[in-house]
Image (spheres, helix red, strand yellow):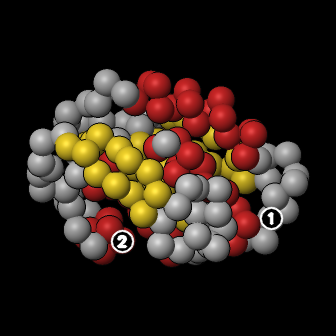
Amino acid sequence: MHIALILSTVIGISRAKGLAADQACSARALIYSATADFRHDSIPTAVQALITNGPASNVQFDHTEDQTWFTDDRLAQYDAIVFLQNTGEVLDTNGQAAFQRYIDSGGNFVGIHAASDCLRNSTFFDRELGAHFDYHPEIQNAIIDVIGPSHPSTANLPAQWHVFDEM
């Protein structure tokens, strides 16, 4: 279900930009999964799932853990930048500046799971997120309710589903 939510978010971004849903891979997103602190074992599985399932939703995903990819020219090729379970200071000053220019010029950002546990020393990223990861409770059962089912980013999701996660 997490993959469906992620794909729905990126699809919503592509549709919000006026891209046709029936065009093959009408959206292009960069998955960035570098970590400098705790590393989730699920990162390779999540990356592969996005890359494999993206084309069925008209999204082409590229992947890197190389912070030197964060340049103006390279980021401009993407409709969205996806931070996937990043932790710690994963971009140098030049990478942070390029990422900020990308966002400031209308680029899209999707943060997944631990993405709020990185770049704590970046005022720009602090402002974009509004908060950083502090802690999470033990894994537990939860019910997810979609409150805006008519929005393109949630149109493909069920009205409600059950998860067992860190909520």
- Which residue is at 46% across, 57% downward? 160
Secondary structure beneath label 2: helix
Does residue 48 appear in this view?
Answer: yes
**Tag 1 residue:** 19
| Residue type, mark 1 in image | Leu
Q: Position of residue 11 (x, y in %)?
A: 67, 57
- Which residue is at 40% across, 30% downward? 43
Disc 2 and disc 1: Cα gap in Å? 25 Å
- In the rendered view, does 142 fall on the left or right side of 82? left
- Disc nearest the viewer among 2 and 1: 1
- In the rendered view, does 110 fall on the left or right side of 107? left
* Residue 133 drawn above or below residue 84: below
Q: Position of residue 91 (x, y in %)?
A: 35, 48
Does residue 86 appear in this view?
Answer: no
Q: Position of residue 27 (x, y in %)?
A: 72, 53
- In the rendered view, does 158 fall on the left or right side of 167? right
- In the rendered view, does 82 fall on the left or right side of 56? left
Residue 128 circle label: 2
- Which residue is at 24% across, 36% downward? 36
Q: Position of residue 46 (x, y in %)?
A: 47, 32
